[in-house]
Amino acid sequence: METKVVIIDRALIRDDQLLEGAAILRKGGLVAFPTETVYGLGANALDPEAAKKIYAAKGRPSDNPLIAHIGQRSDLEVLVKEIPEAGRKLMKAYWPGPLTLIFPKSSAVPYETTGGLDTVAVRMPSDLVAKRLIELAGVPVAAPSANTSGRPSPTTADHVYEDMNGRIEMIVDGGPVGIGVESTIVDVTGSVPMLLRPGAVTLEMLCDTVGQVAVDPAVAKPMSAEIKPKAPGMKYRHYAPKAELMLVEGKEQSVSDKVVDVIANMALEKRAQGHEVGIICTDETYDRYPEEVRIRSLGQRSKEETIARNLFGVLREFDSLGVEYIYSESFSKEHLGQAIMNRLTKAAGYHILEV
Ligand code: AMP
Ligand code: MG
């Protein structure tokens, strides 16, 4: 299959550039498109055959559910059986935006889209290209991140091309995304809203809106064999670079000399053995690491937005450079930091060294 790339000028989003993609979606094909979080791999959420194509293109296990994206609030009705009160409040506060809500599903949503669950995940993106594409398609669009299953999510159209060229009909290139980590996911089907995946709508923001919010244990810790995951997808390895990644965590919020020394020494040791080695750090520490290895800063430590936006791109860059071992500084777990550390710890396979 030839994958067509359509480049969008964000200064002037024109319908005629999006109509072909919208028609492909409506007819059951696959179109990758930008959202404010990461690039999504879209298909008609109401078409079971289309949903199956997503799993095939990504190599994703078919019990890992998809998020249905809508263009406007009124498109929610067809997807859900009911809208719990907490869901109403959260939608009012954060839609359109990087927040996915889990509702009881309606009979219109096929089990192929929900990975066999009786619930459906729904989000209304704020990205104007995504919004217009979905509106023109005229159907809800199931869209997981547009990466090969397990790899870091794509934050540019080039990342999507790397993974999906030849596997999907079209890539809509709207430039690099703004947020860089996937949406926050909150299950509102129970008595207390439950955070399943942290994102740019932070736990603190959710609590401001609905009071109490529970946090699924899988957000911070590996899923033990006995616990049945709330969403099957939570059990899979995620966001991972090809390299072995280790996170080094100090006792203080700032990065101590000890953290820098430990990372530098481990990196040099692997380098001396002839391996390709990468270090993930911040602007504050960049100059303190040895030149013999590849060093990438995610930005200023205090600018969490920048750190989040750069994270997956650096992991992918290390993949393309053939890096075999990555050592990373760690970050505060508050606010957006919770999402950053959630992705980093999963990418590291929970390989964390406390010093
Ligand atoms: P992705 O779009 O690739 O970032 O992944 C979508 C994720 O949304 C899945 O891995 C699940 O964790 C979550 N999800 C989707 N649908 C549901 C659902 N019905 N219940 C719980 N989690 C869901
Ligand atoms: Mg994903």
Image: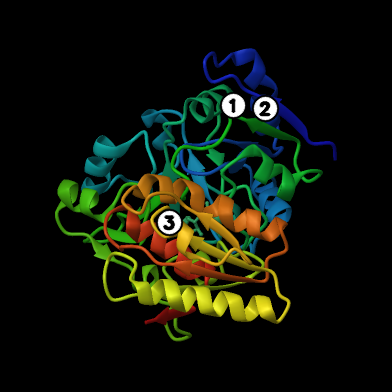
Viewer-proximal residue among 109 and 321: 321
User: Are circles 2 and 1 on residues that touch, CB within 8 Å?
Assistant: yes
Check disc 3: other Cα within 10 Å, few if <14, some if 14-19, many if 20+: many
Q: Position of residue 75 (x, y in %)?
A: 43, 32
Mark positioned earlier in the residue sequence (3 or 2): 2
Viewer-proximal residue among 161 and 248: 248
Instruction: Name the residue beneath numbered marker 1.
Output: 137
Dot 3: element: loop
Q: Which one is closest to the eye, mark 3 or mark 2?
A: 3
Instruction: Name the residue beneath numbered marker 3.
Output: 282
The three-letter code of the residue at mark 1 reads Ala
Q: Position of residue 330 (x, y in %)?
A: 40, 67
Instruction: Answer with left or right where residue 267 lies relative to residue 58.
Output: left
Mark positioned earlier in the residue sequence (2 or 1): 2
Instruction: Name the residue beneath numbered marker 2.
Output: 21
Cα–Cα span, label 3 and label 2? 39 Å
Q: Quadrant of the C terminus?
A: bottom left
Q: Is mark 1 within 8 Å of ligand 1?
A: no
Dot 2: element: helix
Cα–Cα span, label 2 and label 1? 8 Å
Mark positioned earlier in the residue sequence (3 or 1): 1
Q: Residue at x 68, y 79 (%)?
A: 272
The three-letter code of the residue at mark 2 reads Gly
Residue at the right extreme, as displayed: 1
The three-letter code of the residue at mark 3 reads Thr
Q: Which one is closest to the eye, mark 2 or mark 1?
A: 2
